[in-house]
Every structure is written in structure tokens, then in C-alpha cells.
Amino acid sequence: MFASLEFDSIKTRLIIIIGVCLLGMLVLVGNQIYNTDRLINLNTQSKKLLSLSRELLQLRRHEKDFLLRLDPQYVDLFKTRADDFSQQITQIKPVFAKLGDTNTLFDELSHNFFQYRSKFFALVNLQTQIGLDENSGYQGRFREATHSLEKQFQELRQDDLQVLLLQMRRSEKDFLLRKKLEYVDRETVLYQQLSLAISRSNQFNVQQQQTLLNTYQQSFMQLVSAYQTNGLDHNLGLQGQFREQAHALESQLTRVNDKLAVLISNAEQRVERISLVIMTITSLALIILLVKSYITFQRAFLNFVMFFYRCKREYQHMDSKKLGFSEFKYLATIANEMIDARCEMERQLNAANKHITELEKANDINKRCD
């Protein structure tokens, strides 16, 4: 029966067309939902990276505030933000691992941040040894010693020794201001002259003065050594290494941002390509089905028109193989049965007419014979 679900039936063809439309729409909607969610996720991570960039700027701000003002509160602020920065890296790294090949970049970023943080605290520790103000660290020790020595020279009216000490302090301050080792050499020469002059004086406190001078010189040389380790300018020593590490961290964070921008661009292009492919496949499938159905309908109707046209003159059977759809084939079978029934009825009618004619002829002959 035509009601049965056959592949070449109109019902099946319509169901296939509807199914193709629904499937194409569902796949397209599913693709949009999935990739939109992915793009939202990528943009969320982009915002987190932007937050990381802001955190890094705040870290650099606290770092420079400490180096400029030598105030420990900026170290505490730096430590708090550094902990937050490290925690954010730990949180977003697994998310990025699902989005693309960024594991290496994040490993390098984590390593660079660890080095940056370590070098900053090493710098803070070294600066603490040097002295956070004039009364602490090496600065405080040699300042206290030199003030005591100056006081003794003034009380004992040792003007020549006081002049040498003032020249030493001038060289010391020149070094602290300009960070050039030539002032250290000059200060060392003056120290030797002052030490010799103290040893030749006839004062009762020569030993005490010599101890204070040695304390001053030892503390000053420790301070010079610390400054050399720290770096006599921003490109040398620990200060230069720290600066390079900070720049490397900024560069690494920029690379991660660039990588994410590429991922976002690729995801957007992928959405466009997949959507275009889905729409193209769906459209081609529908076009093929509709064209094929149109051709089949047209052929079937032409066959029916020719069939009814010929039925007026000749009783010809319709070829059901040329009709395409099973419903039309069923109609063709019924039409052929009707033709067969009509032919049979006409044959019987002709036979009856012939029999009647023969009977009439027989009756005529009988009448004539009578």
C-alpha cells in the first residue's frame, strides 16, 4: 500500500526534506552554542590576562616606590600582590591548557615571575643591609662611628685630623651620590692617611679613635661591596638582573596575550567555516532532493496526461516504472485494472451483441422457412 513508508514515496520524500532541514538547523544551532561558549570562555580568559597585566603594573609600581622611598610598607604591598598574581596564574593555567598549546608559555611565565619575585626580595634584603635610612644598616654603623670620631676631634681640637675626616666623608658622599669607584679609591687613600695621623698623635684615646675609624671604614667598604652587588647603575648587578627579569616577565605576558588573541581569531574563523559548511551541505541536500522530486513529479504528471489522452482512443496500460513515486505507481496499477475491466466488459458486450445478432438471423431464417 502507498501508506507504507517506502523510500520512493512522496511521504518519505517529504519526511526526508523536513529531516534534512531540522538536522541542518540543529547542527547549526549546536555549533553556534558550542563555539559561542568557547568564544565567551576565551574572552573571559582575555579579561583575566588583562587583570594579570594590571597586577604586574601594580607590582612594578610598588617595586619602584620601594626603590625610590626605601619604605618597607611597599614591600608588604608587593608581597600581597605577588601572591595574588601567582594565584591567578595557577587558576587560569588549566583553563588555557584546554584552549590551546599554551603550557610552555605558562611554564615560562611562572618561571619568570618566580625569578622576578625572588630577585626583588634579594634586592630588598641587600638594600636592608645597606640601610633603609641614614641610621640603619651599613650606613647607620659608619655614620654613628664617624659622628663619634668627629666629636672627639672637636673636643681635643685635632683640626688636622678633622680636615682629613671631612675629606673622607666628602669622598663617601660623592660615592653615594654618583656611585663611581674612583671616590672609593680616594676615600681609601684618605683613610690610610687619617689612620697614620691618629697613630702618631699623642692623645690618650688613640686606640678608641682607631677603633672608631676602622669601624667606619669597614662599614663603608661593606656598603661599597653591597652597592657593587646591587649594581652601581640600573643595568649592573642585581638591580640590572632584576630589571631584565621584569622586562622578560612583561614580554612573556605579552606573548601569552598574543597567543590568546590568535586562539580567539582562530575560534572565530572556525565558527564561520563550520557554519558555512553546515549551511552549504544542508542547502545542497535540499536542492538535490527538491530538484529530484520536481523532476519525478513532472515526469509522473506527463505520463498521467498522456495516459488519459490515449485512453480516449486506445486502451493502453500505463508503465508504472516511469512514474517514480510509489503513490503514482499505485494509481497507475488501479488505472490499468480499470482499463482491463473496461476491456473485459466491452468484450463481453460485443460477444452478447454478436450472439443476439445470430439469434435474430436464425429467427428470420425460420420465419422464411415457415
Image (spheres, rainbow, N blue to C red):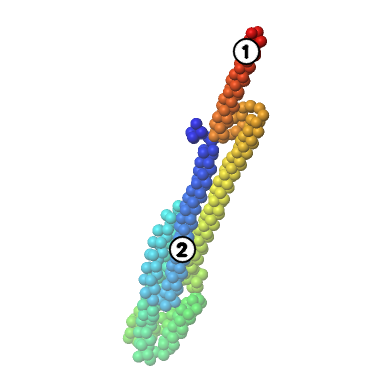
Identify the mark at residue 363; answer none if there is no mark: 1
Pick the front one: 233 or 215: 233
Q: Quadrant of residue 339?
A: top right
The residue under the point 39% across, 76% down is 71
The residue under the point 41% across, 61% down is 88
- Position of 353 with respect to 85 (left or right) is right
Q: Residue 111: give x, y in percent of width and height.
A: 44, 59
The residue under the point 53% across, 56% down is 268
Q: Nearer the viewer, mark 1 or mark 2?
A: 1
Identify the mark at residue 47; answer none if there is no mark: 2
Q: Residue 129: give x, y in percent of width and height.
A: 38, 72
Q: Quadrant of residue 324?
A: top right
Element class at badge 1:
helix
Q: Report whether residue 54 is seen.
A: yes
The residue under the point 53% across, 41% down is 14
Q: Amino acid at mark 1?
A: Asn
Pick the front one: 354 or 328: 354
Are there few (<14), some (14-19), or many (20+) residues within 10 Å of tag 1?
Answer: few
Pick the front one: 158 or 196: 158
Marks 1 and 2, the one that precedes in the sequence: 2
Are there few (<14), some (14-19), or many (20+) residues within 10 Å of tag 2?
Answer: few
Pick the front one: 191 or 79: 79
Q: Amino acid at mark 2?
A: Lys
Element class at badge 2:
helix
Q: Report whether residue 145 is seen.
A: no
Eyeballing the image, is 9 above or below 232?
above
